Image: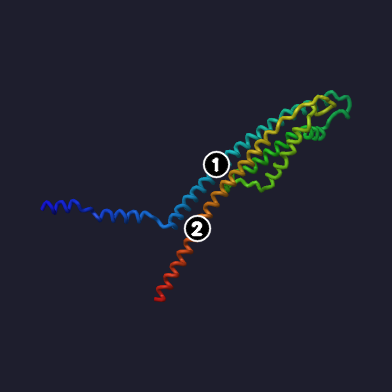
Protein backbone atom coordinates (compact mmCIF):
# COMPACT_ATOMS: atom_id res chain seq x y z
CA UNK A 1 0.00 0.00 0.00
CA UNK A 2 2.91 2.32 0.72
CA UNK A 3 4.21 1.61 -2.80
CA UNK A 4 0.90 2.67 -4.27
CA UNK A 5 0.97 5.90 -2.27
CA UNK A 6 4.50 6.66 -3.49
CA UNK A 7 3.46 6.06 -7.06
CA UNK A 8 0.48 8.37 -6.66
CA UNK A 9 2.62 11.06 -5.09
CA UNK A 10 5.20 10.76 -7.84
CA UNK A 11 2.68 11.29 -10.63
CA UNK A 12 2.54 14.80 -12.06
CA UNK A 13 -0.83 16.34 -12.74
CA UNK A 14 -1.52 16.61 -16.43
CA UNK A 15 -4.79 18.53 -16.31
CA UNK A 16 -3.18 21.66 -14.87
CA UNK A 17 -0.50 21.91 -17.55
CA UNK A 18 -2.98 21.40 -20.37
CA UNK A 19 -5.29 24.06 -18.97
CA UNK A 20 -2.35 26.47 -18.70
CA UNK A 21 -1.47 25.86 -22.33
CA UNK A 22 -5.06 26.46 -23.34
CA UNK A 23 -5.11 29.73 -21.40
CA UNK A 24 -1.92 30.94 -23.06
CA UNK A 25 -3.28 29.98 -26.44
CA UNK A 26 -6.44 31.94 -25.73
CA UNK A 27 -4.38 34.95 -24.73
CA UNK A 28 -2.47 34.89 -28.00
CA UNK A 29 -4.52 36.97 -30.37
CA UNK A 30 -4.56 36.84 -34.10
CA UNK A 31 -2.42 39.43 -35.90
CA UNK A 32 -5.47 41.21 -37.27
CA UNK A 33 -6.89 41.60 -33.76
CA UNK A 34 -3.59 43.04 -32.57
CA UNK A 35 -3.65 45.48 -35.46
CA UNK A 36 -7.19 46.54 -34.60
CA UNK A 37 -6.17 47.21 -31.02
CA UNK A 38 -3.18 49.22 -32.26
CA UNK A 39 -5.49 51.15 -34.58
CA UNK A 40 -7.82 52.02 -31.72
CA UNK A 41 -4.89 53.22 -29.59
CA UNK A 42 -3.51 55.32 -32.45
CA UNK A 43 -6.90 56.93 -33.04
CA UNK A 44 -7.13 57.81 -29.34
CA UNK A 45 -3.62 59.27 -29.50
CA UNK A 46 -4.54 61.30 -32.57
CA UNK A 47 -7.65 62.68 -30.87
CA UNK A 48 -5.64 63.64 -27.80
CA UNK A 49 -3.10 65.38 -30.02
CA UNK A 50 -5.91 67.30 -31.72
CA UNK A 51 -7.29 68.36 -28.32
CA UNK A 52 -3.82 69.49 -27.25
CA UNK A 53 -3.46 71.54 -30.42
CA UNK A 54 -6.87 73.12 -29.86
CA UNK A 55 -5.86 74.16 -26.35
CA UNK A 56 -2.58 75.48 -27.72
CA UNK A 57 -4.41 77.57 -30.32
CA UNK A 58 -6.66 79.05 -27.64
CA UNK A 59 -3.63 80.11 -25.64
CA UNK A 60 -2.01 81.62 -28.73
CA UNK A 61 -5.18 83.57 -29.47
CA UNK A 62 -5.04 85.05 -25.97
CA UNK A 63 -1.40 85.91 -26.55
CA UNK A 64 -2.34 87.63 -29.81
CA UNK A 65 -4.61 89.97 -27.85
CA UNK A 66 -1.62 90.88 -25.68
CA UNK A 67 0.44 91.52 -28.82
CA UNK A 68 -2.29 93.82 -30.13
CA UNK A 69 -2.15 95.74 -26.85
CA UNK A 70 1.66 96.03 -27.14
CA UNK A 71 1.50 97.34 -30.71
CA UNK A 72 -1.19 99.86 -29.77
CA UNK A 73 0.98 100.97 -26.87
CA UNK A 74 3.95 101.41 -29.21
CA UNK A 75 1.93 103.59 -31.57
CA UNK A 76 0.27 105.65 -28.84
CA UNK A 77 3.30 107.74 -27.87
CA UNK A 78 4.37 108.85 -31.39
CA UNK A 79 0.77 109.72 -32.30
CA UNK A 80 0.38 111.84 -29.17
CA UNK A 81 3.72 113.50 -29.88
CA UNK A 82 2.73 114.22 -33.48
CA UNK A 83 -0.64 115.66 -32.43
CA UNK A 84 1.15 117.88 -29.92
CA UNK A 85 3.55 119.12 -32.60
CA UNK A 86 0.66 119.94 -34.94
CA UNK A 87 -1.18 121.83 -32.22
CA UNK A 88 1.93 123.80 -31.33
CA UNK A 89 2.48 124.69 -34.99
CA UNK A 90 -1.14 125.79 -35.42
CA UNK A 91 -1.04 127.91 -32.28
CA UNK A 92 2.14 129.65 -33.38
CA UNK A 93 1.10 130.07 -37.01
CA UNK A 94 1.01 133.65 -38.23
CA UNK A 95 -1.17 133.00 -41.28
CA UNK A 96 -3.75 130.55 -42.56
CA UNK A 97 -1.12 128.90 -44.74
CA UNK A 98 0.82 127.86 -41.66
CA UNK A 99 -2.20 126.17 -40.07
CA UNK A 100 -2.59 122.44 -40.69
CA UNK A 101 -6.18 121.43 -41.36
CA UNK A 102 -7.87 118.26 -40.13
CA UNK A 103 -7.32 116.10 -43.23
CA UNK A 104 -3.76 117.29 -43.61
CA UNK A 105 -3.15 116.47 -39.96
CA UNK A 106 -4.49 112.94 -40.46
CA UNK A 107 -2.23 112.44 -43.48
CA UNK A 108 0.78 113.69 -41.52
CA UNK A 109 -0.01 111.45 -38.54
CA UNK A 110 -0.41 108.36 -40.71
CA UNK A 111 2.69 109.21 -42.72
CA UNK A 112 4.74 109.73 -39.58
CA UNK A 113 3.54 106.52 -37.90
CA UNK A 114 3.24 104.19 -40.91
CA UNK A 115 5.80 101.85 -39.37
CA UNK A 116 3.78 101.36 -36.18
CA UNK A 117 0.52 101.16 -38.16
CA UNK A 118 1.90 98.20 -40.12
CA UNK A 119 2.68 96.47 -36.82
CA UNK A 120 -0.89 97.01 -35.60
CA UNK A 121 -2.32 95.65 -38.86
CA UNK A 122 -0.07 92.58 -38.63
CA UNK A 123 -1.15 91.95 -35.03
CA UNK A 124 -4.83 92.09 -35.96
CA UNK A 125 -4.27 89.74 -38.91
CA UNK A 126 -2.57 87.19 -36.66
CA UNK A 127 -5.39 87.45 -34.13
CA UNK A 128 -7.89 86.81 -36.93
CA UNK A 129 -5.95 83.71 -38.00
CA UNK A 130 -5.93 82.38 -34.43
CA UNK A 131 -9.64 82.87 -33.72
CA UNK A 132 -10.91 79.57 -32.20
CA UNK A 133 -12.73 77.48 -34.78
CA UNK A 134 -14.16 73.98 -35.02
CA UNK A 135 -10.96 72.73 -36.64
CA UNK A 136 -8.05 72.11 -34.27
CA UNK A 137 -5.43 72.73 -36.95
CA UNK A 138 -3.87 76.09 -37.77
CA UNK A 139 -4.27 76.74 -41.48
CA UNK A 140 -1.66 79.10 -42.89
CA UNK A 141 -2.83 78.80 -46.47
CA UNK A 142 -5.04 81.87 -46.07
CA UNK A 143 -4.98 85.44 -47.33
CA UNK A 144 -4.61 87.03 -43.84
CA UNK A 145 -1.49 84.99 -43.13
CA UNK A 146 0.04 85.75 -46.53
CA UNK A 147 -0.64 89.45 -46.01
CA UNK A 148 0.88 89.43 -42.52
CA UNK A 149 3.92 87.56 -43.87
CA UNK A 150 4.34 90.19 -46.58
CA UNK A 151 4.29 92.97 -43.97
CA UNK A 152 7.05 91.37 -41.86
CA UNK A 153 10.01 92.08 -44.21
CA UNK A 154 8.66 95.57 -44.84
CA UNK A 155 8.72 96.33 -41.11
CA UNK A 156 12.19 94.87 -40.72
CA UNK A 157 13.42 96.92 -43.66
CA UNK A 158 12.00 100.11 -42.16
CA UNK A 159 13.50 99.29 -38.77
CA UNK A 160 17.05 98.65 -39.99
CA UNK A 161 17.24 101.12 -42.88
CA UNK A 162 15.24 104.19 -41.86
CA UNK A 163 15.23 106.71 -39.06
CA UNK A 164 12.44 108.92 -37.82
CA UNK A 165 12.54 112.69 -37.24
CA UNK A 166 11.88 113.74 -33.69
CA UNK A 167 9.01 115.94 -34.91
CA UNK A 168 6.40 115.12 -37.54
CA UNK A 169 6.19 118.77 -38.64
CA UNK A 170 8.83 121.34 -39.38
CA UNK A 171 12.41 120.80 -40.47
CA UNK A 172 13.78 119.12 -37.38
CA UNK A 173 17.22 117.57 -37.79
CA UNK A 174 17.04 115.39 -34.69
CA UNK A 175 16.46 111.73 -35.54
CA UNK A 176 15.15 109.00 -33.28
CA UNK A 177 15.38 105.22 -33.58
CA UNK A 178 12.18 103.30 -34.10
CA UNK A 179 11.00 100.63 -31.68
CA UNK A 180 11.61 97.06 -32.76
CA UNK A 181 8.34 95.52 -34.01
CA UNK A 182 7.38 92.97 -31.38
CA UNK A 183 4.75 91.54 -33.70
CA UNK A 184 7.52 90.18 -35.94
CA UNK A 185 8.66 87.91 -33.13
CA UNK A 186 5.12 86.72 -32.54
CA UNK A 187 4.64 86.10 -36.25
CA UNK A 188 7.68 83.79 -36.14
CA UNK A 189 6.23 81.98 -33.12
CA UNK A 190 2.90 81.44 -34.88
CA UNK A 191 4.63 80.13 -38.00
CA UNK A 192 6.78 77.66 -36.07
CA UNK A 193 3.81 76.51 -33.98
CA UNK A 194 1.75 75.88 -37.10
CA UNK A 195 4.62 73.91 -38.64
CA UNK A 196 5.05 71.71 -35.56
CA UNK A 197 1.31 71.10 -35.22
CA UNK A 198 0.96 70.19 -38.89
CA UNK A 199 3.87 67.75 -38.73
CA UNK A 200 2.50 66.17 -35.56
CA UNK A 201 -0.96 65.64 -37.02
CA UNK A 202 0.49 64.36 -40.30
CA UNK A 203 2.49 61.75 -38.40
CA UNK A 204 -0.58 60.65 -36.44
CA UNK A 205 -2.64 60.38 -39.62
CA UNK A 206 0.15 58.46 -41.34
CA UNK A 207 0.38 55.92 -38.51
CA UNK A 208 -3.38 55.39 -38.52
CA UNK A 209 -3.37 55.02 -42.29
CA UNK A 210 -0.58 52.42 -42.23
CA UNK A 211 -2.36 50.30 -39.63
CA UNK A 212 -5.67 50.64 -41.49
CA UNK A 213 -4.03 49.50 -44.73
CA UNK A 214 -2.46 46.53 -42.92
CA UNK A 215 -5.84 45.51 -41.53
CA UNK A 216 -7.35 45.73 -45.01
CA UNK A 217 -4.53 43.54 -46.38
CA UNK A 218 -5.10 40.91 -43.69
CA UNK A 219 -8.83 40.92 -44.36
CA UNK A 220 -8.23 40.39 -48.07
CA UNK A 221 -5.83 37.52 -47.31
CA UNK A 222 -8.35 35.89 -44.97
CA UNK A 223 -11.06 36.25 -47.59
CA UNK A 224 -8.89 34.60 -50.24
CA UNK A 225 -8.00 31.74 -47.89
CA UNK A 226 -11.65 31.14 -47.12
CA UNK A 227 -12.47 31.12 -50.81
CA UNK A 228 -9.71 28.56 -51.46
CA UNK A 229 -10.99 26.35 -48.65
CA UNK A 230 -14.50 26.50 -50.06
CA UNK A 231 -13.20 25.56 -53.52
CA UNK A 232 -11.27 22.61 -52.10
CA UNK A 233 -14.34 21.41 -50.23
CA UNK A 234 -16.44 21.76 -53.37
CA UNK A 235 -13.94 19.66 -55.39
CA UNK A 236 -13.95 16.91 -52.79
Q: Residue furthest bottom?
A: 235
Query: Does residue 6 sit above or below 96 in this rendering?
Result: below
The answer to the question of whether label 2 and label 1 lie on touching residues, with beta carbons closer than 8 A, is no
Apparent side of residue 209 relative to residue 111 in the rendered image (left or right): left
Q: Is residue 54 above or below residue 111?
A: below
Q: 90 or 149, which is in the foreground?
A: 149
Where 46 sits versus 66, above or below? below
Check disc 1 and report its element: helix, strand or loop.
helix
Residue lying at 72% horizontally and 28% vertically, measured from the top left: 77
* Residue bearing mark 2: 214
- Spot occupied by residue 205 in the image (x, y as percentages of width and height): 55, 51
Q: Is residue 94 above or below residue 103?
A: above
Q: Circle 1 sits on which residue?
A: 55
Q: Residues within 10 Å of mark 1 (few under 14, many from 20)?
A: some
Foreground mark, 2 or 1, reads: 2
- C-alpha distance separating marks 2 and 1: 32 Å
Amino acid sequence: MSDNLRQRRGKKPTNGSSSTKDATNDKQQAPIEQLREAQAKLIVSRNRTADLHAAWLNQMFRMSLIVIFVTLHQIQKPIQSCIGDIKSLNEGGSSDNDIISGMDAIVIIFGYNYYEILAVVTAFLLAFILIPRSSSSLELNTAPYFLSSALVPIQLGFYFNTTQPASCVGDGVELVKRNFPAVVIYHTIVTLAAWFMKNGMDQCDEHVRLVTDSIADFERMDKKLQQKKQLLKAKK
